[in-house]
């Protein structure tokens, strides 16, 4: 059976709802990685002692869920919907192919 | 000998040490990148150690030894010679006075650290600071407090507007200009890595300042109380006015700003603290918060000098304001000690203050220039190489990392 | 004038300031999310500045000015009028007394910060705190310490069980209820982001409390020593009993718990500190650790009020316990100062204490309600919007980030 | 009764408490892994609470109660019996003396924490510390300061070289040896997780030491001033010499090294502080920085004992150096108090000091061994299991995490 | 020659042994990324002032080693074995395909 | 249209120049992840109280940019050049294939 890695970048405070959504579709093992998101609509300015510091990124979390092919669609959907309350601001979700991992891993 | 006065100066000595360690170390440490936080603290420790030993060996004598032509103290008190448990200074033991003054000799060069963070060689820090304590601090301390020529002229500097803040501020500007800017200055610097650390340091500085200004009364009396009142109010007013400016200019006040305003208010009230009342403190603090805020901009944006943590803008400018305004604010009308009256009309006093200011600026700038030049020769350039600066001084100069969480 | 007493109150003034800055700022700062740590510290700095200025301008006069019908002080001491370096208060200069009291006027509104962290507008904090100092703190301070009606009745409140802890605790509960809960309360909150910072703050509060309770003796004598003994033992007992409860309930004691127990013990012993001996402190601390622990649960789980950092449960409940139990614990049998005797039989005293408690609760709750309502109108709602709360107040209200490691 | 002396000892009591909380808690906390930082702080809080209560209940009496055969104090002062606001000790209230001494009884067992961090059960910490305060600290305190046999012999230990540092250092070594090494010792340990926290702690220890040594004069006079002078200079010299060794050996000095040198200098000067002048402090500090540096290596590399934070190498060795060298350094020639003369020729004194040292080492080592054995039985082994050690004590023993940034 | 990315999530304190094992099979360049692991058997409860906080994850490290095809098997094996002393708790290892990187990269 | 993930590990202080370079070639959305880099030429020794601690890694940043096939080459090139001022020390850049993500994502 083939596994895929579903990944997305979400806002930090959406981590809990997203994991809850993934649990619902039966995905329990997930990796969350803190990341800095650089993007057009991102970044902000901090002012210290009158000097402006451009902070081009915003803190976010990269979510990785390695799931069986059969689960990919629901996983992607669950991730997207839970990524933001505002349909306009939902995160994009990507799917990575995986070659066979170690059989032990598969079977576990 | 008065045990109450002695108790207060003993406590004040501890409070002033608290200002540098850990106060200033935290205040400055939080303002730099996380890759240089330890180096800044190390500079404060190193300076504290060096200044303490030098003060014992010769600094105290140069400052408070028998006056030599009004310019310098003699060698009579080298290694605290003659300072035993019985010798007195006013109503307290001289050894207590000598230790109290030592804590001033520690924090003054430590204030300068803010000028050269993240790019200076550690040996250069020690060399410059050591020479500075002997060639700049001690003489000026003698002029103003050691019955030197300025004291004879009746200059008013209660706790160190000239001796501490102006001398440190001016020297900081000179060093910063000679050392050059941090890579990325001014456009692409990283923001302070730990504003909470800076705020904690500012708070300890605030608390310690009670000993700094209140202790300068050298007695536990109403004068000390009034000095603390003026000091505390100036700190509060400085925080308020600095924050107000930020609020108007940027739409919101910041913690780093409030903390800086506190320090600006405290530095500014220092020379006046024992001569003015709370009203004087209020005025000095309020003025400091605004003027120092814009001074930061002038130094960094106009002069384009990377006095990185704004030592000149806060301590130099603040000290100068206090040194000049005390001439008026000491008026009894403002609950001031009224000292200004005894020491001649306000304008006369202003003249004396201005002269002292010029003398201190000239001496500090001149000798600092020479010291840096000399140190540069000895250390083969006082600045670390580009790569070391990028990687941060913690790892490159001290082999440590600030955080392994 | 006694220089020894003066020296101690000068030192105590520094110690009590240390309690708020940085003590309380660190204690509270470590308990919130990392995205709001700076905002909490900023609230403490802002309140310190505002309260200091107000105390100078009018607060001190309202509290200690000539009594007006037992309810309020007159305008005689506005802007510290008449408080010069010679005027005395008992054996110390009045200016020292006024500054010592100022540090109390700073920490009391700052304690309330714990009620509204992570979701309140900064302008609202300043507005509420300023009004609170004048309308709630100053009157109550006058009643109890400014020869107001409660003092006339012989109420016992050595260092501020009523004036500081109960008034702050009750007001905190009211504000928290009116402000509403944090998003995610109670189920999905993030744990304290930096318990070590909280512990460091608690330690500084403990140390500073020596000045708070010991300084309230207004003299450097055995009474001050005894107050410190009772205070310190109560802190130790509070840590022990709170930890014991956790151990029994959850199988292990936590640092945040021990630190909270320390504060609970200290708040509880405060009104009694000068009247009881170490035995009294032991009892008060032990009781506080247990009762306050469960009070936290009652407020958050039963009342479902998000008094976020448990100001009411710790300071309100603790202060109340101390105010009531002092009636018995002051008994000479317990090495107490025996003051209770002079002030009538224990039950009589208990009646006075209970009345005082009721009066303070009513006044504080009532005026806090009005203040919040008014502030809400002025600031267009005292709460920030959902998004700002999620992103954290550091960035949204102050434009800073707590950590850039 | 002298109010000035009392004021100073009240302030000193606060300063010594500051040494443990938060000073030592931060100093030690920064040196461990981030997964055990809270457990170290918790150990300091737990010990502070336990030692305080025990001191009140019986410890003070065992130390300063009427002498029983020179070995122990009687039960006369149990629960501070007879210690009221009027009873005096010299020129200060006895309650102030008792509280000042309490802070010593707190920090001494807390120093030992450095020996067993990251792998000991919390109940074992409490058990061992409690027994240690009664069986080791109190007796030795009585011998040296409670008119016990060593005091009768004229042993010189001004502020606790024997009572505090040597006793703690030796016991630390014993516990560490019995407890066993941390996993990965010595090759694969993680470096200190937060050197800045350690430096801040060292700074607070430095400041607090003014109260520790200066307060031990029990008066606000020239003697206290001289003690602070010797103390401060020793700290500076310790930082300098330790850093110098690092510089020569590794090419650069570290902040952790400088901070450790400060503590080494302070521990070493402690027994001598009131008997020597600044010159004596300079020598003691300079020696301490070098000797303690190599002592660390001996303990860890030669003896292969994981006295994790070098309690023995710094406090044990440092204390011993001071205890022995004071015999010579107290000479008036070195501005010393000259006390050595009254107490016989230097060599005689050296004999007394050596005997005292041997006695303390023997007693502390012996009873610590017994205490650990007993505790081990009671707690079913004083060490946590492998997994808990790997995951860190914060989560496994206290259910908390140090940082959630 | 084709490169693959071998990746696994391991417990923090296994990082050193794992890197040692990889060195043995000739893999010297490795990237380690701190991550939060969400999984059935994970998470714990923290109690502050009587209130329970559910912390659903545990701290772990994501290991990435980009190796030549020929090395994949050993790398996977080495990683798995070193990931835990307890054969039952070993981490699963996944292999990601890689398209040509930059030639410079290849050759280096 | 097919998307690829271009990834590289760069030195922390090169993050800003790298992002600037990516913006120039039209890549605005980028994820940066802090990582520990283990490598032959890496690591250093820290000395505390005379004891040496081997720190085998150096702090660096993993950069991920998911771009359209057509942009891969420029992206790779831009990333490489900006990764170091010294041509010898440039980072290697890898390209990961991606299966279809969610259409919404695509379209956005
Ligand atoms: N194509 C991409 N490649 C790498 N990271 C991306 C990409 N698209 C989005 N991200 C990450 O997700 C974050 C949020 O993306 P998104 O919500 O689409 O806002 P934006 O379009 O401004 O990037 C971005 O800041 C970035 O860190
Ligand atoms: N299929 C997966 N997708 C993403 N992350 C995973 C997956 N399997 C394991 N992990 C990560 O590795 C961690 C440990 O996994 P494992 O040891 O298998 O325990 P569990 O089976 O409970 O997840 C998980 O917490 C998760 O962070
Ligand atoms: N093949 C690889 N697999 C995983 N990470 C790598 C690989 N090559 C490089 N890296 C990461 O990038 C960092 C820098 O790599 P590079 O500049 O090539 O130096 P080195 O060749 O010593 O690894 C490495 O420390 C490692 O973290």
Image (spheres, coloured by chain):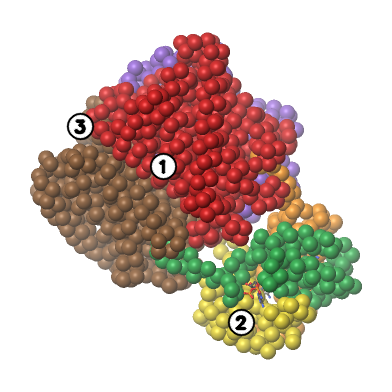
Chain colours: A orange, B red, C purple, D brown, E yellow, F green
Is E90 drawn above or below residue B328 in the view shown? below
Residue B75 pos. (x, y %): 32, 34
Q: Residue at x 65, y 83 (%)?
A: A105
Mark 2 — residue?
E27
Distance of label 2 from label 3 (alpha carbons):
73 Å
Q: Quadrant of residue D244?
A: bottom left
Chain under numbered label 2: E
- Residue at horizontal 27 percent and vertical 33 percent from the top: B83
Q: Is mark 3 within 8 Å of ligand 2?
A: no
CA neighbours of label 2 inside 10 A, class few (<14), some (14 to 19), many (20+): many
Residue B51's disc is 1
Please rate how many residues cluster around mark 3, counting C-alpha atoms within 10 Å: few if below 14, some from 14 to 19, many from 20: few
Residue C172 placement (x, y as % from top left): 58, 36
Quick one: E4 or C161, which is closer to the camera?
A: E4
Determine whether the beta carbon of the residue marked 2 sits less than 8 angstroms from the nearest atom of ligand 3: yes
Vertical side of D284 occupied by C74: above or below? above
Picture residue at 87% right of the left edge, 62% below the top: F108
Which is more foreground, mark 3 or mark 1? 1
Identify the residue position indicated by label 3 in the image.
D90
């Amino acid at each position: 059976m083939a596994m895929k890695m579903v990944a997305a970048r979400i806002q930090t405070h959406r981590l809990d709802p997203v994991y809850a959504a993934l649990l619902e579709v039966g995905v329990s093992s997930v990796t969350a990685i803190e990341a800095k998101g650089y993007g057009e609509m991102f970044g902000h300015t901090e002012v210290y002692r009158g000097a402006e510091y451009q902070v081009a990124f915003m803190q976010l979390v990269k979510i990785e869920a390695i799931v069986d092919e059969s689960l990919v669609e629901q996983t992607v959907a669950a991730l997207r919907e839970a990524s933001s309350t505002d349909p306009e601001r939902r995160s994009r979700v990507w799917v990575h192919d995986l070659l066979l991992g170690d059989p032990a891993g598969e079977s576990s | 000998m008065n045990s109450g006065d002695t108790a207060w100066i003993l406590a004040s000595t501890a409070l002033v040490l608290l200002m540098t360690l850990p106060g200033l170390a935290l205040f400055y440490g939080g303002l730099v990148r996380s890759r240089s936080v330890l180096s800044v603290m190390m500079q404060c420790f190193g300076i504290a150690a060096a200044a303490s030993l030098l003060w014992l060996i010769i600094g105290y004598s140069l400052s408070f030894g028998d006056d030599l032509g009004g310019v310098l103290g003699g060698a009579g008190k080298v290694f605290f010679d003659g300072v035993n448990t019985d010798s007195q200074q006013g109503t307290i033991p001289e050894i207590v006075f000598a230790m109290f003054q030592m804590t001033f000799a520690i924090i003054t060069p430590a204030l300068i650290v803010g000028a050269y963070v993240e790019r200076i060689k550690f040996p250069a820090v020690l060399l410059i600071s050591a020479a500075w304590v002997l060639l700049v601090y001690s003489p000026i301390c003698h002029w103003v407090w050691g019955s030197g020529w300025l004291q004879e002229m009746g200059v008013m500097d209660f706790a160190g507007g000239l001796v501490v803040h102006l001398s440190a501020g001016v020297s900081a500007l000179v060093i910063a200009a000679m050392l050059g800017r941090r890579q990325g200055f001014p456009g692409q610097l990283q923001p302070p890595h730990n504003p909470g650390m800076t705020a904690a340091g500012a708070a300890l500085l605030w608390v310690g300042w009670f000993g700094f200004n209140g202790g300068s009364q050298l007695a536990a009396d109403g004068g000390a109380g009034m000095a603390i009142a003026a000091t505390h109010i100036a700190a509060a007013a400085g925080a308020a006015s600095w924050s107000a400016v930020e609020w108007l200019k940027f739409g919101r006040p910041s913690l780093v700003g409030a903390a800086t305003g506190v320090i600006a208010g405290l530095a500014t009230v220092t020379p006046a603290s024992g001569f003015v009342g709370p009203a004087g403190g209020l005025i000095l603090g309020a003025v400091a918060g605004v003027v120092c805020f814009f001074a930061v901009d002038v130094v960094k944006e106009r002069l384009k000098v990377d006095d990185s943590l704004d030592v000149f803008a806060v301590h130099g400018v603040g000290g100068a304001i206090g040194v000049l305004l005390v001439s008026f604010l000491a008026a009894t009308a403002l609950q001031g000690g009224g000292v200004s009256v005894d020491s001649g009309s306000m304008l006369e006093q202003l003249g004396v203050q201005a002269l002292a200011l010029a003398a201190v600026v000239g001496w500090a700038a001149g000798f600092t220039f020479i010291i840096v030049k000399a140190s540069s020769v000895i250390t083969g350039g006082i600045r670390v190489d580009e790569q070391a600066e990028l990687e941060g001084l913690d790892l490159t100069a001290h082999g440590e990392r600030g955080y392994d969480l």
